[in-house]
Image: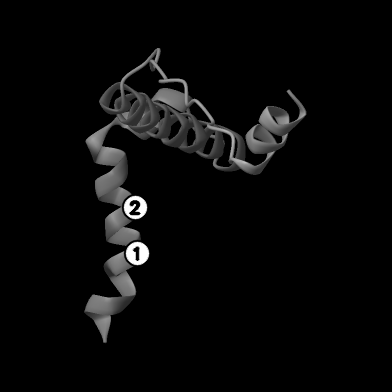
Amino acid sequence: MDEQQRQEEKQPKRRWRRSRTRLFPIWLRLLLVLVLVVISTAAGAMMGYSVLGDGKPLDVLKPATWQHIVEIVTKDVNSK
């Protein structure tokens, strides 16, 4: 028995890997991250527009607001 135990100690032990079953597939995780990025960007824009700009929070979602912002930003570029 002692010799058998020595041989077992010399041989590397096999490590069994467990297979992982994912609760959410990778594509669903990526979609969730994308949705959370869009939601956080919209929420941040609404907070910034209403708190810093003293506007209504839902006005930031209107295309007219963004057109006005683009006109302000590009005003100096066109006048040169």
Question: Mark 2 packing: few (<14 Cα in 10 Å), some, or many (20+)?
Answer: few
Question: Mark 1 packing: few (<14 Cα in 10 Å), some, or many (20+)?
Answer: few
Residue wearing tag 2: 69
For the residue labelled by badge 1, is the local secondary structure a helix, a strand or a loop?
Answer: helix
The residue positioned farthest toward the bottom in the image shown? 80
In the image, residue 21 lies at what x, y percent? 38, 15
The picture quadrant where one finds residue 75 is bottom left
Q: Is residue 25 above or below residue 67?
A: above
Q: Is residue 65 left or right of residue 15?
A: left
For the residue labelled by badge 2, is the local secondary structure a helix, a strand or a loop?
Answer: helix
In the image, residue 25 lies at what x, y percent? 31, 20
Q: Which residue appears at 58% of the width and 41% of the height?
A: 12
The residue positioned farthest toward the top in the image shown? 23
Which of the numbered marks, if any, corresponds to residue 73? Answer: 1
Q: CA distance from mark 1 to mark 2?
A: 6 Å
Q: Is residue 80 left or right of residue 29?
A: left
